[in-house]
Amino acid sequence: MKIRWWIEQGYQQLKDELGLDHYEGRTWRGWHHHVTLTMIAFAFLVLEMRQGQKNFWTDYAPAGGAA
């Protein structure tokens, strides 16, 4: 299990693509706000990526079909 690798990749993506390391404020509230929004953006991007993969939804009902 290469969990550390996955964590480091996620952190690097947060810094490179979403600007986690761009915060220059001085307050705890501002830093917390910045990190929270960055993590929400990251979660959204991961979900978008996963939904594009084959077999993401394994128990879906086809459009127009009965559930």
Image (cartoon, rainbow, N blue to C red):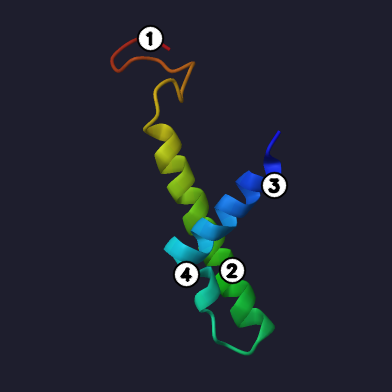
The image shows residue 57, relative to residue 37, as above or below, that is: above
Looking at marks 3 and 1 on the same chain, the residue that comes earlier in the sequence is marked by: 3
Is label 4 or label 2 in front? 4
How far apart in space, not on screen, are marks 2 and 3 (Cα)?
20 Å
Q: Residue at x 28, y 14 (%)?
A: 64
The amino acid on which the numbered mark 1 sits, given as a three-letter code, is: Ala
Looking at marks 1 and 2 on the same chain, the residue that comes earlier in the sequence is marked by: 2
The image shows residue 55, relative to residue 28, as above or below, that is: above
Residue closer to the observer: 28 or 54: 54
Residues marked 3 and 1 touching at CB (< 8 Å): no
Q: Is residue 4 left or right of residue 30?
A: right
Q: Quadrant of residue 33?
A: bottom right
Residue closer to the observer: 32 or 8: 8
Write down the residue under mark 2. 35
Residue closer to the observer: 18 or 61: 18
Q: Residue at x 69, y 47 (%)?
A: 4
How far apart in space, not on screen, are marks 1 and 4 (Cα)?
44 Å
Looking at marks 2 and 3 on the same chain, the residue that comes earlier in the sequence is marked by: 3
Looking at marks 4 and 2 on the same chain, the residue that comes earlier in the sequence is marked by: 4
Is label 4 or label 3 in front? 3
Write down the residue under mark 4. 19
Q: Position of residue 18 (x, y in %)?
A: 45, 64
The amino acid on which the numbered mark 2 sits, given as a three-letter code, is: Val
Residues marked 4 and 2 touching at CB (< 8 Å): no
